[in-house]
Amino acid sequence: MKKPEEDRGAVLDEIRQQLADGTLSFGGAIRQLRLRVTGLNQTDFARMCKLSLRTLRQLEQDTGNPTVATLDSVFRLFGMRVGIVAVRRREDRGMA
């Protein structure tokens, strides 16, 4: 049985929110983009992002030390880019 198609916009919104919340790593986000949005295997996704397969594997596993430019090369394809966000203090989250 074929898995029902996920709404691309909803998936992208979910990934953006999880990144902003800090509940999803860059590597996890890249893997989710690959699997849930494109459905591509690692080889084809790496080619699409103009990355080596080794680099993509390292990104998805949160290993290595990628540059902002490398991360941006993936995220820009999905209308996102790497940036700085404000971190809420503990008391702002009700955890005084």
Image (tube, grey):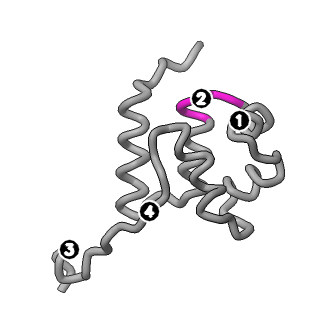
Number of marks in the rendered image:
4
Q: Which residue is mark 1?
A: 45
Rendering coords of residue 28 (x, y %): 57, 53
Q: Which residue is mark 4?
A: 83
Measure the alpha-carbon separation of dots 2 and 1: 8 Å
Kind of residue indicated by mark 1: Phe
- Point 45% across, 46% down: residue: 80
Rendering coords of residue 12 (x, y %): 42, 38
Q: Which residue is mark 2?
A: 38
Measure the alpha-carbon separation of dots 4 and 1: 23 Å
- Relative to residue 44, is residue 68 depicted above or below? below
Closer to us: 84 or 95: 84
Q: Residue 37 in magenta?
A: yes
The mark nearer the N terminus, 2 or 1, is: 2
Determine whether label 2 and label 1 are within 8 Å by CB: yes
Determine whether label 2 and label 3 are within 8 Å by CB: no
Q: Which residue is mark 3?
A: 93
Mark 1 residue element: helix
Measure the alpha-carbon separation of dots 3 and 4: 22 Å
Q: Residues within 10 Å of mark 1 (few under 14, many from 20)?
A: many
- Point 18% across, 83% down: residue: 91
Determine whether label 3 and label 1 are within 8 Å by CB: no
Kind of residue indicated by mark 3: Arg
Mark 2 residue element: helix
The mark nearer the N terminus, 4 or 1, is: 1
- Relative to residue 14, is residue 22 depicted above or below? below
* Prevailing secondary structure class for the magenta stretch in the rendered image: helix
| 40 horizontally vs 54: left or right | left
Q: Which residues are magenta?
A: 35-40
The mark nearer the N terminus, 2 or 3, is: 2
